[in-house]
Amino acid sequence: MSRIVPLNPDAPIGSQLRQLREKRGLSMLQVAESMKVEVWQVVEIEQTTDKELKMEVMRDYISAIGGRLTSRANRSGEISLDS
């Protein structure tokens, strides 16, 4: 079963991704290993204060926490996490 978690366009994307990772009970090291990057890169992603993040970075991060990124034509991003 999947659930849709809409992104809040008014909040920094990094903090939203961090919250999703924490809800999944994953460490930054686990995410970094899954993404095949260094931990400092995961820290950078989660600390970004921008409201935008490259789609491929978001896709890789979300995949690393066990989710799937989907988007709609109206530009509202959604994250589908398997339960």
Image (cartoon, rainbow, N blue to C red):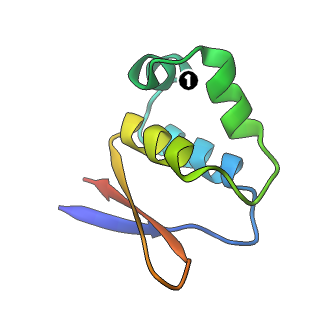
Kindly indicate the quadrant of the structure image that contains residue 43: top right
At 33% from the left and 41% from the top, the residue drawn is 66
State whether residue 57 is above or below residue 73: above
Which residue occupies the extreme left position in the image? Answer: 1
Q: Residue furthest right?
A: 49
Q: Name which residue lies at 68% across and 46% down.
A: 14
**How many other residues sit within 10 Å of disc 1, few (<14), some (14-19) or many (≥20)?**
some
Q: Position of residue 75 (x, y in %)?
A: 56, 78
The residue depicted at 24 percent of the width and 62 percent of the height is 2
Left or right: residue 43 versus residue 56 is right
Residue placed most toward the observer, 25 or 7: 7
Relative height, residue 33 to residue 53 (above, below): above
* Quadrant housing residue 5: bottom left
- Determine the residue positioned at 54% across, 53% down: 55
The vertical placement of 62 against 81, above or below, is: above
Q: Indicate the amino acid at tag 1.
A: Met
Q: Quadrant of residue 72?
A: bottom left
Q: Which residue was labeled with disc 1?
A: 28
Q: Position of residue 38 (x, y in %)?
A: 59, 14
Observer-nearest residue: 38 or 54?
54
Counting the numbered discs, the total is: 1
Q: Is residue 7 left or right of residue 40?
A: left
Say what secondary structure mark 1 lies in.
helix
The quarter of the image holding the N terminus is bottom left
How far across and how far down the image is residue 30, in percent?
A: 44, 20
